[in-house]
């Protein structure tokens, strides 16, 4: 049995491939990857996406996505990558006929911006951005393909995974990593949300652990509804910055020359103020 990981060049994908062990993994993304069994291609193209599911694939971890800000800026591309490519993979699984496990990276973006405290698995989804709507549609498809026996599907609604290295991507929640990463690198940072804005956060190590555990769970323990919310730690932007300052005073001298200032969010509807569990 082989394992397919889409989005394997990304922050979570790289960590997952390494945790699974490269020998058993076929890693795919649209950029080069430092893995033995790597396939470079764009899953937005149906032929490529469907070619990935072969009889030897027993587990699919589908992480590839156009993240929130990018999907909001480019609706057509977001639909192709986030919805159409997922359906192409599911269709390939159906046609293959051996019902592989299909573990999907969903998002707390499905909940929208007016939320109870706490958010639970039973909180009704009400996405306010295209990314959240696309993820919710994919969850529904996975439930139905699982019901019909085409895949053994599971979906994890991920909080903000941090701290992402390198430059910022187009995720609306990218500030949660930047507010820590940039000052620790000695760079000033202007945070695009209010100090009291809270974000549910989780480490990449815990996310990888949860993906692996989700693949191991027997289908009977999930029931008909195949989506699970991952618990995040709810932290405000001010608390993040305060933690960085405390740490920086101990180990990073250059931070004494760095500063973090806040400005009002440009689009409050795209940045839920209270998306914690």
Image (cartoon, rainbow, N blue to C red):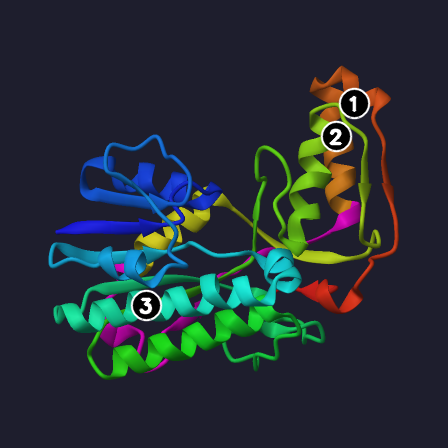
Point out the frontmost of discs 1 and 3. 3
Q: Quadrant of residue 118?
A: bottom right
Disc 1 residue crowd, few under 14, some 14–19, many 20+, Cα 10 Å: many
Residue 88: which numbered mark, if any? 3
In the rendered image, is residue 131 in sight?
Answer: yes
On screen, residue 58 versus residue 259, left or right, reads: left
Q: Front-most of 85 and 183?
A: 85
- Which circle's residue, 3 or 2, is located before the other in the chain? 3
User: Mark 2–mark 1 contact, CB under 8 Å?
Assistant: yes
Q: Quadrant of residue 150?
A: bottom left
Point out the frontmost of discs 3 and 2. 3
Q: Is residue 100 magenta?
A: no
Whether 65 is drawn above or below 174: the answer is below
Q: Kindly identify the residue that appears in the image at 66 percent across and 74 percent down.
A: 128
Q: Is residue 236 magenta?
A: yes
Residue 264 at x, y = what percent?
Answer: 87, 55
- Which circle's residue, 1 or 3, is located before the other in the chain? 3
Q: Kindly identify the residue that appears in the image at 73 percent across and 20 percent down.
A: 250
Real-space Cα separation, disc 3 to disc 2, in angstroms = 41 Å
Whether 126 is drawn above or below 134: the answer is below
- Span of residues in magenta: 215-238
- Residue corresponding to mark 1: 255
């Amino acid at each position: 049995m082989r394992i397919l990981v889409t989005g394997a060049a990304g922050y979570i994908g790289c960590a997952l491939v390494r945790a699974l062990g490269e020998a058993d993994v076929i890693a795919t993304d649209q950029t080069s990857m430092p893995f033995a069994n790597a396939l470079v291609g764009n899953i937005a193209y149906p032929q490529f996406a469907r070619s990935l599911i072969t009889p030897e694939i027993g587990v699919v971890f589908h992480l590839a996505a156009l993240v929130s800000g990018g999907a909001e800026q480019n609706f057509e591309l977001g639909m192709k990558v986030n919805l159409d490519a997922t359906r192409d993979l599911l269709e390939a699984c159906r046609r293959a006929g051996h019902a592989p496990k299909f573990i999907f990276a969903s998002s707390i973006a499905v909940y929208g911006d007016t939320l109870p405290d706490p958010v639970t698995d039973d909180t009704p989804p009400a996405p306010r951005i295209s990314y959240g709507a696309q993820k919710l549609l994919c969850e529904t498809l996975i439930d139905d393909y699982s019901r019909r026996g085409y895949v053994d599907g599971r979906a994890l609604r991920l909080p903000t995974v941090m701290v992402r290295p390198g430059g910022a991507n187009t995720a609306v929640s990218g500030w949660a990593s930047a507010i820590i990463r940039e000052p620790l690198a000695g760079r000033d940072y202007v945070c695009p949300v209010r100090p009291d804005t809270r974000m549910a956060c989780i480490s990449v190590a815990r996310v990888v652990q949860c993906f692996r555990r989700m693949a191991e769970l027997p289908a009977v323990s999930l029931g008909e509804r195949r989506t699970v919310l991952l618990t995040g730690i709810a932290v405000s932007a001010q608390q993040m910055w305060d933690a960085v300052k405390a740490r920086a005073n101990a180990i990073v001298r250059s931070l004494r020359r760095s500063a973090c200032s806040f400005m009002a969010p440009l689009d409050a509807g795209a940045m839920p103020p209270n998306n914690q569990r």
